[in-house]
Image (cartoon, rainbow, N blue to C red):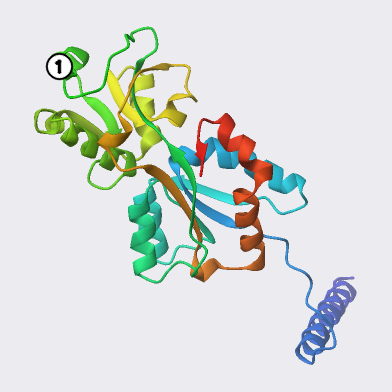
Amino acid sequence: GNRATLRYIWAEISRTMMRATTRALLIALGLLSPLPAQAQGVIIFAAASLTDALGEIGHLWVQAGHAAPRLSFAASSTLARQIESGAPASIFASADEQWADYLEKKDLLAAGTRRDLLANDMVVIAPAGHASPVSINAGTDWSALLGATGRIATGDPAHVPVGLYAKQSLTKLGAWDSLKDRIAGAEDVRGALLLVARGEAPVGIVYATDAAVSKDVAVIGTFPPDSHDPITYPFALVKAGDSAEARALLAFIAGPQVRAVFLAKGFRTE
């Protein structure tokens, strides 16, 4: 009855423990290999504006026989600080040079792996159906675009790359002082896009590639390229996450086989 059942259970437990102990001993002696761990995808920390392109490229990487990359998108500044704090990442893709410089100066990027792969333009958007083209220059009538209480949605100009570029351009065009208190600073460029798409801001300053992904906004103007630093995207391996698989994925992203994806999203390839 119960005693026989208990004896059976104890015997099974003992056999299981013996097998586990024997296996551990064989592994320790080098006579048996551990069970292979399930393949883990390379972790990519990338600027929010790369969301759609890297999502597609990730699918192509899987089709080529690799584990799906794990993608984390946010403002380049946020991601750089997370990497500085020890967050696991193998590839960093920034929307500006500043945050790649930040990590490089702290010796957190793998030497010789940093490459500028992409370029972008900066545009002014408005909700679709409420858009009239304007020329973006020193004579732009921002008060007419904003109305009495409207604000400009863009990245936080204190640290988010698109906001930094926007501040740079508006300063060059002589409009920053009159507009700095009317900036709605989002945590990343996609957040700024959403504010305009929802009609919560009459205009926004985003990248051309972000404007292209939303049917709810329309581009009404483009900033002169000479009004801001070139909008470039440096990619690099993170030293702590450097591996053969990460290097292979970075080479794939930089290679000709995926260039069409970036071009289709509106990026220029370097």
In the image, what residue occupies the spot 46% across and 30% down? 209
How packed mark 1 is, by other alpha carbons closer than 10 Å (few <14, some 14-19, many 20 or more), is few
Q: Quadrant of the N terminus?
A: bottom right
Residue 215 image position (x, y, % from top left): 48, 17
Check the image and report above or below for 253 versus 211. below
Picture quarter containing residue 126? top left
Is 253 left, or right, of 128 in this rendering?
Answer: right
Q: What is the three-letter code of the residue carrying label 1?
A: Ser
In front here: 157 or 191?
A: 157
Secondary structure beneath disc 1?
Answer: helix
Residue 18 image position (x, y, % from top left): 83, 85
Check the image and report above or below for 231 versus 123. below
Picture quarter containing residue 29? bottom right
In the image, what residue occupies the spot 66% across and 45% down? 256
Picture quarter containing residue 141? top left
In front here: 2 or 249?
A: 249
The residue pinned by badge 1 equals 143
In the image, what residue occupies the spot 20% across and 31% down? 183
Check the image and report above or below for 113 versus 99. below
Extreme residue toward the left, this view: 177
